Structures are given as structure tokens and as C-alpha cells.
Amino acid sequence: MSSLKAVFDQARRERRGAVVAVIPVADPDLPRSLAYAASAARGGADVLALALPFSDSLEGPELRAAFERAGKRRSGIDPFLQEVPALRERSATPLLLATYSNPLQAFGERRLLTRWREAGGSGLLVLDLPVDASGPLEATCREVDLDLVQTVGAGSGTERASRIAAHATGFVFARLRYGASGRREFLPYQARQVFAAVRDRGLSVATGPDLHRPEQAADLCRAGADGVVLGAGLAALLARAPGEDEVEAFVRAFRRALSPD
């Protein structure tokens, strides 16, 4: 069974939501970012999403700022891949590589996926890859034994959500949509329908990443999400160069908010 699917299944058996912690790689530098990842795992993260920096990111301001800081380090993908086994030794938490199409193609799709799997990775999330163009990547992921997590807008229609889920393995990432006001633009009813359409395909759905407070995460799981993706709030914390114990405590607060009373 997929290790990503397994952690969501385990969380469901425990009657709680799963926590996917997004760690921008090389922010503030490569060693500390991986140390923060290990701290997030100690805090109860079910999945560690290691996000490669990309200058044209579609994410919110906190993650864009993290990617800009990391990009200035120019540490590169090779050094990162060389350090992943050391993180794997510190934590058995499944690792998800989050990236965009340009870095993936520049490094070499098969080369990157093969090395990521050899380093101990469990899955891949390409944030700007439309499902209609994902066929070749799906095939490569199957060949190297990686899950391919697909993205759906949390306000999408159920037919599209179902079609996207049919091309995913591990879980589906339901991205929250924000406008200039910073407030959600979708109705809770729409989100619930998207979550249900994904689950009808036999997969779990995690939503985010613009979460700052544990109660936000709890609300989303009450609305039907199987887990949350901690991105913006965690990136804002990491921007302050916190201690590892602060990162652990931050993630633990979300884990507790998603656990039964």
C-alpha cells in the first residue's frame, strides 16, 4: 500500500485529521530546513512536504517569500537530494516532494524522480501541472514507485474533482482559493462536495495551504476534509528563524486540534 495513503487511513482509524507540513527547502539554509522538517515530524506531522524553491510560485505571500529567500542560497537540487537520506534516518514520516514543472524539467523528470525515490521519497506534487497533461508523469511515477498527488481547486465542480482524483495516488490536495481580501472565495457547500467527490474515488483529501491557526484546520476537517496542508502559517514562523522546539510545538498544536477530544 502507498505510504501516503496509509497515513491518511491510519488517521481516519484514529478519528482525526492528518497533518501535511510544508517545509520550504533551503530556508534559511539547507541544513536548518531539514532540521525543521525533523522537528515537524516530532510535532506529529503525518507527511513532510519538502518544497523546492521556485521564483514564479503561485502560492501566497508567506511561501513566496520563503522561496525567494531560499532561491538566494542557490543550494541546488543535487545537494538537497544528497541530504534527504540523513533526514530519512531521523524520521520515518513519509516525504512528499513539492515542486513546479520548470524545476522538474530542468533537472530531468526521470532523473529527479528516480533519485528522489532512492533517497527515500514517497510521492510527488507538481503544483502547476494540469491533470490533462499529467499522463506521462503518471507513468513515470508508477515506474519508479512514487505516488503522484494531484491538485484540485476547493471550489471546483464535483465532476472535475472526480476526474482529477482518478489520476491521483496517495491523496489529493484541495487548494483553498483566496482573493485580494485574503478571504476564502468558495462556499463551504462547494468544498464539501469536492471533498466527497475525491473520497468517492477511494482517496483522502487534504486542504490548505493558507492556514495560520489550529481552529481554521479544525473547521476544515469538520467540513469534510481528511487533513490539512500547513503552508502559510508555518512559513511565517520559519521566517523568524525559530528554534526547532518552536516548530515542533506549532505543528503539535494543529495535530491536537485535529484529534478527538
Image: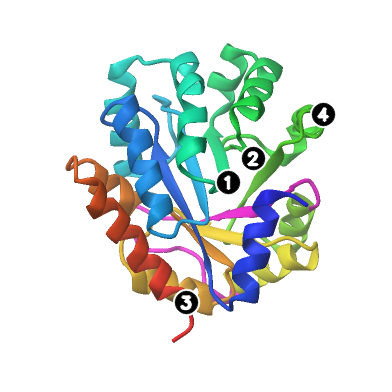
- The residue identified by callout 2 is 122
The amino acid sitting under disc 2 is: Ser
Report how far apart the C-alphas of labels 3 and 2 lie in the structure: 24 Å
Work out whether mark 1 precedes mark 3 in sequence or the reverse, and give the earlier one: 1
- The residue identified by callout 4 is 143
- The residue identified by callout 1 is 94
Q: Residue at x 64, y 34 (%)?
A: 129
Work out whether mark 4 precedes mark 1 in sequence or the reverse, and give the earlier one: 1
Q: Residue at x 31, y 45 (%)?
A: 235
Span colored in magenta = 166-190
Q: In terms of secondary structure, what is the magenta stretch mainly?
A: loop
Q: Position of residue 3 (x, y in %)?
A: 68, 50
Report how far apart the C-alphas of labels 4 and 1 lie in the structure: 19 Å
Q: Is residue 162 left or right of residue 109?
A: right
Badge 4 vs badge 1, beta-carbon distance below 8 Å? no
Q: Nearer the viewer, residue 90 or 254?
A: 90
Q: Determine if the magenta segment contains residue 129.
A: no
Question: Can residue 256 be seen?
Answer: yes
**Closer to the eye: label 4 or 1:** 1
Residue 72 drawn above or below residue 186: above
Q: Determine if the magenta segment contains residue 180.
A: yes
